[in-house]
Image (cartoon, grey):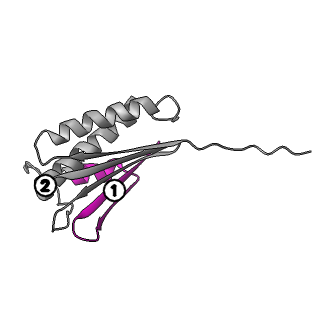
Amino acid sequence: MRTHRRTHRRSAQVEYLLPDEAESAGRARKLTSQFLARRALWAVGLDAERIGDAALVVSELVTNATRCGGSCRLCLHVSDTQVTVEVYDGSPGRPGVRPLTTWGESGRGLAMVRHLAQRFDIDPVDGGGNRVRAVLAL
């Protein structure tokens, strides 16, 4: 007789609306850290380093969104294997990764996000704006 094991995948998600303010990036970083810290008890591999990486990704994406497109929406999804960060903005233009320069004072955010993420994409949203998504593996 064979027994069948059921694997239970756990997941949780949350969404935040953030105003067009300089403080939104810091607020988003704090909300992300708190949300993921509560999930770290069951998400194997979701340790302080991965929570820090996700919070940094959120901070960079929300900073870009509020600079270019006004207010934004942050969606976080955590599962047994990954953390997905999505930021929606109302910007008419499409964000892009700039080439890094030695003396540049800005333009490193999306390059950093691409480095930390297992998957990174930018897609236009119907009705205007963009969805920037970064998936971090656990």
Residue 89, horizontal then vertical, whole percent: 21, 58
Residue 62 seen from this side: yes
**Amino acid type, label 2:** Gly
Between residues 74 and 80, which one lies in front from this camera angle? 74
The image quadrant that residue 101 belongs to is bottom left
Tell me if 106 is positioned left or right of 47 in this view.
left
Q: Residues within 10 Å of mark 1 (few under 14, many from 20)?
A: many
Q: Is 131 included in the stretch rendered in magenta?
A: yes
Residue 48, horizontal then vertical, whole percent: 38, 29
- Mark 1–mark 2 distance (CA, rounded to whole Å): 18 Å
Q: Residues within 10 Å of mark 2 (few under 14, many from 20)?
A: some
Per the image, the residue denoted by label 1 is: 133
Q: Which mark is residue 50?
A: none
Q: Is 54 included in the stretch rendered in magenta?
A: no
Tell me if 9 is positioned left or right of 96 in this view.
right
Instruction: Describe the element under mark 2 as helix, strand or loop.
Output: loop
The image quadrant that residue 35 belongs to is top left
The image shows residue 43, relative to residue 74, as above or below, that is: above
The image quadrant that residue 95 belongs to is bottom left
Residue 47 seen from this side: no
Q: Which of the marked residues, 1 or 2, is nearer the chain's N terminus?
A: 2
Per the image, the residue denoted by label 2 is: 70
**Amino acid type, label 1:** Arg
Tell me if 94 is positioned left or right of 53 in this view.
left
Instruction: Describe the element under mark 1 as helix, strand or loop.
Output: strand
x 53%, y 32%: residue:
42
Q: Which of marks 1 and 2 is in front?
A: 2
Magenta stretch?
A: 110-138
